[in-house]
Image (tube, helix red, strand yellow):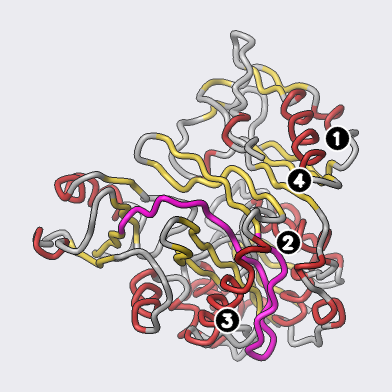
Amino acid sequence: MRLLILGGGRAQLSAIKKTKELGHQVIVSDYLKDAPGRPLADHAELVSTFDIKDNIRVGQNYDIDGVITIGTDQPVYTAAAVADKLNLNTLIDKTTAKAVTNKRVMKNIFKKNNIPTAQFKIIDKNFKKKELKDIHFPAVIKPLDSQGQRGVFRINSIEEVSLYFKDVLEFSREDEILIEEYYESDEITISGWVEQGKTNILTITDRITYEQARHIGICTAHIFPSRYLHNYFREIENISKKIVRFFNIKNGPIYFQFLVGEKGIKVNEIACRIGGAYEADFIPLITGVDILKMVIRAALGQSIDLKQLNNYNILNNDNWLSVQLFFAKRGKVQSIGNIDEIKKMDDLIKIELNYEVGDTISKIQNATARAGYFIIKGVSRHQLKENIRKVYDNLLINNEKGENLVLRQAGEVL
């Protein structure tokens, strides 16, 4: 069978490899000629994952049997639209796909159905100050239809809304933006699977973020289990079920981002996909549920084995794991050291770098500036912390002066 995978970036590599392992052909669409997933695919097309019309054409040309994306937000709608046009199996319809990829629709559903979220407003460039009378600063402005923290800024006044309005729209196809109150909080992520409307929570992680000047929410690590798992589980579960109900999510993966602060839980954003922090790799390891295989089989119209899902209980999961999405300071990479030694460490699952010797590391503005990642386990919180420390102690990305550029403090926060 033939599966069209939208995106050939690092977040989609596991989907490409898994699909081929299952004996299917892979067609990748990506607008980048050097996308790392292109050489792994059976066929690759130079097409943007945002381009519905061209991806329909790709699907027709290859007579595909299914279409998916993982680890990225906006192509979720493209996948639903392609599946609808070509009469393919789809986990969510276009209406739901639109609701979980456009913050105007998403936030209004939150508001209408009393799903807790930060106070917000949708505005255009001609907004009046009185429109923001209910917004307390500091606030956050975001594109309505972007991803990876692109175009997201923390601001302190109404005047700064106008100052950064154009910068936000550079990452959007809309002419309006979202402004919402900044909520001082910790962030958690919920990954799960919906089967015939039933919500099954697989993991709840602490999502560690990095803030630099006005750029906020850039993820540097995920830690399982979340510190809020046991005390907040019922509330997390109830809010998740409410989201599934009012967004009409019938089947497939879910990825929700919640904020936990003094005023309780607020929903930040939601998605109907596998997360972009390599959840496709680590969820099967710590839950026994191969969520990626389930997505692939469902998209191809094949049956899904639900035994592991039905037997799983997150409250009985005693694993400890972290994904460290590390960044580095600006500079030219002169040398990279100790990767082979790190790969020999106990409990290390995987490590990958996004830069090579001779590359120049750019300024951190969003998630695209990551220097690499590693996934590591531990039998306890203490051991997991020690394992993470050992990796960072050995991880070297040096500049011409011999300085290590790795920003270990951004994610090493157990």
Residue beneath label 1, please? 343
* Residues at marks 2 and 4, CA–CA distance in whole angstroms: 12 Å
Q: Nearer the viewer, residue 344 or 63?
A: 344
Secondary structure beneath dot 1 equals helix
Disc 2 residue type (three-letter): Ala
Mark 1 Cα-neighbour bin, 10 Å: few <14, some 14–19, many ≥20 = some
Disc 1 residue type (three-letter): Lys
Residue beneath label 4, please? 375
Which residue occupies 85% across, 79% down?
A: 311
Describe residue 161's horizontal placement relative to residue 78 as left or right. left
State the extent of the magenta-drawn residues as a range: 181-204
* Residues at marks 1 and 2, CA–CA distance in whole angstroms: 20 Å
Mark 4 Cα-neighbour bin, 10 Å: few <14, some 14–19, many ≥20 = many
Describe residue 171's horizontal placement relative to residue 317 as left or right. left
Observer-side mark, 1 or 4, equals 4
Residue beneath label 3, please? 241
Q: Earlier in the sequence, mark 2 or mark 3?
A: 3
Q: Earlier in the sequence, mark 3 or mark 1?
A: 3
Observer-side mark, 2 or 4, equals 4
Residue beneath label 2, please? 280
Tag on residue 209?
Answer: none
Mark 2 Cα-neighbour bin, 10 Å: few <14, some 14–19, many ≥20 = many
